[in-house]
Image: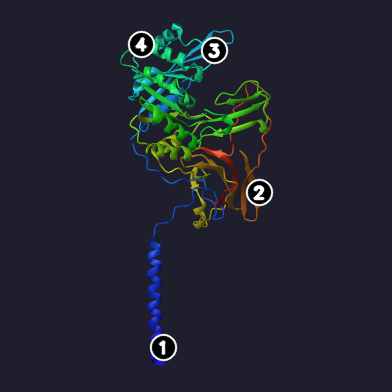
Amino acid sequence: MGNLIKNIRQNQRLLCAVLSAILFVCACQPVAKSSNLNTSPNARNPESTSAPINIHARLAQEVYIWQRQWRPANQTALVQSQGTFKGLRILALQAHPKPNGADIWFEVAVNHAWLQADPRPKVAVIRLDGQLNHLNDEAVINKINQVLNSWREKGTHIAGVEIDHDSASSKLPAYRNFLKKLKAQLPADLKLSITALPAWLSSTDFPALLTNIDELVLQIHSVSDPRLGLFDAAQGWQWVQQLSSISTVPYLIALPTYGSAVISTASGYKVESETPLRDQTRSPETVQELQANPQVLQTFVQRLQTLTDDRLRGIIWFRLPLEGDKRVWPLNTLIAVAKGEKLSASIELAILDDNKIAAQGATATANPPQLSLNTQPRLFRLSLVNRGNIAVELPNILSLAAKACSGYDAQNGYRVTPRPGLLEWQLRAETPEPFVPSAATPVSETTTKLNPGGQRVIGWARCESLYLQGIYAQ
């Protein structure tokens, strides 16, 4: 019996040593990263993150600057984009036809001081509407040369000229003659580029079009019925392969960063971008919002890098986002996509308490505030912040442990519901009101998403204590 008791005691000591070792090892492991939405274990958001993609630097990446009106945000975006995009394609001149046959010319008043401060190669883009009937008119070429001379006189050096003209396939011979004339009048040191539509690739007149240019930009976005989407990766890859098999000049691929709204009307449909269409009677049922998907485009770029064609020189993103733009990716999303960085959205709740901000996520439940002798009610202001690099849906429910609250309110799409020991902020199920036909009608925007770096105030509460218990996504 004595030996038995001795053995049991030895085994107990051994078991305790083993358990202590296991606890020590577990305690030394790094804390697992919390969910990107800081959601509860039951919440699911499969599209909030993507694995990092290794994008090699074989293909240069450029970006279009497509604003007709320049503002301080242009300068900010130019500076912030320098480390990612190696070249700029700048809208310089635009022409539209009028019903009476006259053309409307719009010269963009770019800020030459900002351009000259940017060391990247620059290409001036001339946008000629596909409905123009006078491409062979010398007046068109003279107008282009006037703009180029104006840029030169102001000290802005350009490496080339790009003609953006959505010609019908049947008019490619006339377009070729125009390009031949234009090329003959351009300075020898200027590269002539053109944009190309996928429909041209099947035309027998397409190969001859390449004889008068130095470079081609294939547009594979918004080229079909816009109601089918802005970008089809499978179809786009087929077009790239088709061009690769027939091109005799270097080429680049233009990819989208923007969104648009397709408005159904009795006579068909119209597409709305940043500028609202005037006098359009719209209801929620007639408006379809489209947006280029960052994950899809990032995967497509990775695939482009695998194409073994020395004529493929790079990618051009349409367009450079500015702060305040509604239908375009934020700049940090575009940069993350271009660099192949992991795409993620991370919602945090920022609580402002007596001029002190504390960001709280779901992990805050493991560290509730300590008891304090100060029992005076304090004013807490609540804001949601997206710390990630892609837009994210707003959480449906935020649950906060609350003590002795004397007042509270919600705003910006949320309502607050008191529960025993809790205040619960709930996202309202909004029903959009019909649009009123007016020139001042605002651009329709998705109000349930928060952009990277964005912040949304959701309410306030006056309590003795308030801290987050959990953020719950749909």
Rate crowding at label 3 as few (under 14), some (14 to 19) or many (20 or more) other CA atoms within 10 Å.
some
Residue at 57% across / 33% down in the picture? 228
Is 161 on the left-hand or right-hand side of 439? left
Read off the residue under disc 4: 184
Nearer-the-camera pick, 304 or 404: 304
Question: In terms of secondary structure, where does tag 2 sit?
Answer: strand
Q: Position of residue 255 (x, y in %)?
A: 45, 31
Nearer-the-camera pick, 468 or 195: 195
Do callouts 4 and 3 mark residues in contact (Cβ within 8 Å)? no
Nearer-the-camera pick, 217 or 384: 217
Is 172 on the left-hand or right-hand side of 411? left
Residue at 49% across / 46% down in the picture? 359
Distance between mark 4 and mark 3 Cα atoms: 25 Å
The amino acid beneath tag 1 is Ile
Nearer-the-camera pick, 309 or 42: 309
Read off the residue under disc 1: 5
Q: Is residue 301 visible?
A: yes
Q: Is residue 35 above or below residue 158?
A: below
Read off the residue under disc 2: 417
Q: Mark 3 or mark 2: name the one nearer the start of the chain.
A: 3
Question: In terms of secondary structure, where does tag 1 sit?
Answer: helix
The amino acid beneath tag 4 is Ala
Q: Which mark is residue 106?
A: none
Read off the residue under disc 3: 97
Select label 3 or label 1 by which is in front.
Answer: 3
Count of numbered circles in the view: 4
Q: Mark 3 or mark 1: name the one nearer the start of the chain.
A: 1
Distance between mark 3 and mark 2 Cα atoms: 57 Å
The amino acid beneath tag 3 is Pro
Q: Is residue 330 visible?
A: no
